[in-house]
Image (spheres, rainbow, N blue to C red):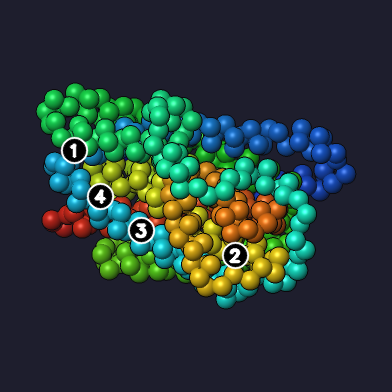
Amino acid sequence: MFKSAFPKKGNRMTLSIFAAMVAGVGLGYVLNAQLTHATPLQREQALEPFSLMADVFLRLIKMIVAPLVFTTLVAGIAKQSGVGAIGRIGAKTMAWFLSASFVSLFLGMLLVNWFNPGASMHLSLPTDVGTTAVVGKTAFSLRDFLYHMFPTSVFDALAKNEILQVVVFSLLFGTAAAAIGDKAKPVVQMADAAAHIILKMTGYIMSLAPFAVFGAMTGVIANQGLGILTTYSIFIGEFYLGLALLFCILTTVAYLFLGRRVGALLSHIREPALIAFSTNSSEAAFPKLMLELERFGCRNNIVSFVLPLGYSFNLDGSMMYMTFASIFIAQSYGIALDFGTQTSMLLVLMLTSKGIAGVPRASLVVIAGTLATFKIPAAGLALLLGIDPLLDMGRAAMNVVGNSFATAVVDRLESKSSWQPTN
């Protein structure tokens, strides 16, 4: 369905993105040295062209994500063989999502207790909570979450890129279209055609990815210096070790369903994962990921159904980070959390993590709300703000990998014959 939207470029784009990352680090180092004595205003003006390169690319991607989720999800659901098929596929999908979410959150909780990275911080409890304004803290509320989940206007949800609200409307719309059958065919065909048009637009936008990566890396290194790569090296190393363990766990489980084809799947999603890693945004990889999953052999109706849901319900890397970071902040202030409290925190995060956008700093908003729930100073988020871009790279890439496994496994469970991947 979607694989014809733009041709496969092999390793060319991957190499271009990697080269852009290296060049960005190099130029960022040079600019950081030159701007050592610059005022904040002078630094901002000097780096503005590089931030614009990344910002324009991300704005273009965000421009198409909501309509792409709507059109592909509606088309994917409506093409299922009846409402019974939707329920069956949906049950398998949610079973994977909930299991992967629990594993991700629980692994983060285990590792942060094992490594105890906050113990050496010895911070005094703050007298103010000014830092919370940086990320827009809100206390956890089940009512607020449910209100946020269900849109009062789908047009408002589309305009504001409220992906969870778009998913809810798309699920209802697609299910209703499947229920009335032939009468809905013109609408379904229109959604299908719109998805192709948007994916063609994606082909144009993705050609700008290397420039966006170059600008983003240059800006981060020029602002923070190479010191950002070492200041929190222990914390960063422990978190990435956690991501590696999560990757191994999910890959092992996926192997039980996919066999040796796991290797082929990882090869197909290499470029989307690198895009997510480089731009700090799993959303940026969404359109390309859809195409690569189809090229791998997943059926378009499964990809269109599972992948958009995954971007609201199955951000594995982000969820592992949430427990890891929340307990790290508590450790930094010397706040002891017993097992029961940490388990309650895990369950709260299991709920509040659903529907977060795959964009930079979305995890910090959820963490801020969780800290407020458990009376942990949200000012501790300042400990993470400087290194969050580096952490966000890993969790964004892990989000892409987790959703790829979910889509491929559900497709395999629904398949009644051996796969014949397309090229």
In the image shown, does 137 or 275 lie closer to the viewer? 137
Q: Is residue 398 above or below residue 62?
A: below
| Disc 3, SS | helix
Q: Earlier in the sequence, mark 2 or mark 3?
A: 3
How many numbered marks are there? 4
Quickly name the residue at label 1. 79
Residue found 27% across the figure and 68% down from its top: 256
Front tag of 4 and 1: 4
Residue found 69% across the figure and 63% down from its top: 232
Q: Is residue 269 left or right of residue 131?
A: left
Quickly name the residue at label 4. 90
- From where the camera sits, is residue 408 visible? no
- Is disc 2 surrounded by few (<14), some (14 to 19) or many (20+) residues within 10 Å? many
**Distance between mark 4 and mark 3 Cα atoms:** 12 Å
- Is disc 4 surrounded by few (<14), some (14 to 19) or many (20+) residues within 10 Å? some
Q: Is there a contact, CB below 8 Å, between mark 4 and mark 1?
A: no
Q: Is there a contact, CB below 8 Å, between mark 4 and mark 2?
A: no
- Using the rendered view, name the quadrant where residue 381 is placed: bottom right
**Distance between mark 4 and mark 1 Cα atoms:** 14 Å
Q: Earlier in the sequence, mark 4 or mark 1?
A: 1
Q: Is residue 342 left or right of residue 256?
A: right
Q: Earlier in the sequence, mark 3 or mark 1?
A: 1
The disc placed on residue 98 is: 3
- Using the rendered view, name the quadrant where residue 123 is placed: bottom right
